[in-house]
Image: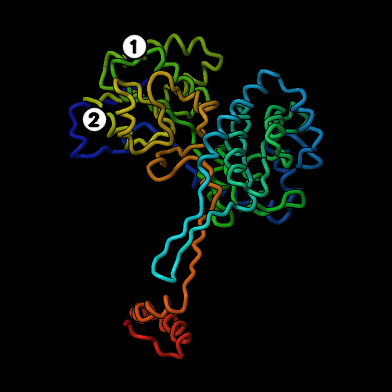
Amino acid sequence: MTRLDLRGRDLAADGVDRDLLPRAELDVEAALEKVRPICDAVHHRGTAAVIEYNERFDGVRLERVRVPAEALEKALKELDPAVREALEESIRRARIVHRDQRRTDSTVRVVPGGTVTERWVPVERVGLYVPGGRAVYPSSVVMNVVPAQEAEVGSLAVASPPQKEFDGLPHPTILAACALLGVDEVYAAGGAQAIAMFAYGTEECPPVHLVTGPGNIWVAAAKRLLKGRIGIDSEAGPTEIAILADDTADARHVAADLISQAEHDTLAAAVLVTPSEALADAVDSELTSQVAATKHAERIAEALAGRQSGTILVDDLDQGLAVVDAYAAEHLEIQTENAAEVAARVRNAGAVFVGPWAPVSLGDYCAGSNHVLPTGGCACHSSGLSVQSFLRGIHVVDYTRDALADVAHHVVTLAEAEDLPAHGAALKARFDWKVPQPK
């Protein structure tokens, strides 16, 4: 990997220039105009347009987009028992974590006779997108469906691209995961046409209120285009891992973890931040031998050699923390002495993995945490998918006549200060146009 040497710089005074840090380029704005006609076609022609774009982009001609119930049942019945057991454990652990995230209503007594209650209400219907392509992601079914179910979403649908080798259905492991979770509304649709199907609705698929789940640049562009008509979780970009490590880290572990995320895509980002040049050298050596032994060696090598990946040398862990906070990684591993203490100081990350025994791969599948996380530096302002993603807070205001009378003069004063006299008049009407003065 390439190296960026930040040693000797006063990052506390000068700050970290985020543009200097390795990052995958993802021009969602440029993709907008390409997905616009796709979304418009689905809006106006419904299922027929989805079928046409499935044929154009995935090489599959379908008669219908919704997956038959018998296909879901068959996929689960034929699922490898070891894969089923692993998925069941992943689901069990995810439920433990996400069930505890459920919010409870809270009522605050502002004044005698005046309360504000915050009610947490689930989104009525959501569309969950599960990508296809280079890999199969039943784990993404788990990560999307479990928090939605724990939030008590009333209606949910899953979309995943059709696969030519499976008669135009999504991958059978995806279907089996849906069946395992009790999801019976599944669509063979990918890319921008799937997001538009969710947003506008079709003859087969009623429209949804919220769309979640990662995808490629066309999915991200469609989400951006349709945001407002639907809520979205985020515009997912290429996956990324950052590792903050000192000379106590095992170079084999560090290299293996960098490779694990580079395996996703040639645009995947793998970044090592360390004050130890010896560790950086050892990791480079490990990468050379480990990459050659992997199944997807060519893809991984391209990702690691890309401008989005690299090693950043720093003076010490304080400087390293400034760098990883500026980078705001989707996944951040802390492999240092006193890793828990260092991790507690991290401000910006989608998820933090502490010490040598909590690799990102654990979080991808069986930690209980969610792996749908903000990318592209968005972790400085956004969170990963959770039960909270599927809930809406509604304020319920309940005041008695006396409680309103006590504050009415302030409301009228502020309304007139903003030149909105009708706001004040709404209170005057309740008191015969005479606003009582405070006692």
Q: Looking at the image, can residue 196 be seen?
A: no
* Residue for point 50% across, 24% down: 362
Which quadrant of the figure contains the C terminus?
Answer: bottom left
Q: Is residue 294 left or right of residue 128?
A: left
Mark 1 / mark 2, whichever is N-terminal: 1
In front here: 102 or 331? 102
Q: Looking at the image, can residue 229 be seen?
A: yes
In front here: 355 or 98? 98
- For discs 1 and 2, the disc positioned in front in the rendered view: 2
Point out residue 27 in the picture as x, y percentages from the top left corner.
Answer: 47, 42
* Residue for point 59% across, 30% down: 92
Point out residue 201 in the picture as x, y percentages from the top left corner.
Answer: 70, 53
Residue 12, above or below 284: below
Indicate the amino acid at tag 1: Ala
Residue 249, above or below 269: above
Q: Residue furthest front?
A: 112
* Residue for point 48% across, 37% down: 373
* Residue for point 71% across, 37% down: 182
Point out residue 87 in the picture as x, y percentages from the top left corner.
Answer: 63, 26
Q: Secondary structure at mark 1?
A: helix
Residue 415, above or below 398: below
Indicate the amino acid at tag 2: Asp
The residue at which mark 1 appears reads as 282
Picture quarter containing residue 10? top left
Q: Are marks 1 and 2 in contact (CB under 8 Å)?
A: no
Which quadrant of the figure contains the N terminus?
Answer: top left
Point out residue 218 in the picture as x, y percentages from the top left corner.
Answer: 57, 42
The residue at which mark 2 appears reads as 318
Picture quarter containing residue 229? bottom right
Count of numbered marks: 2
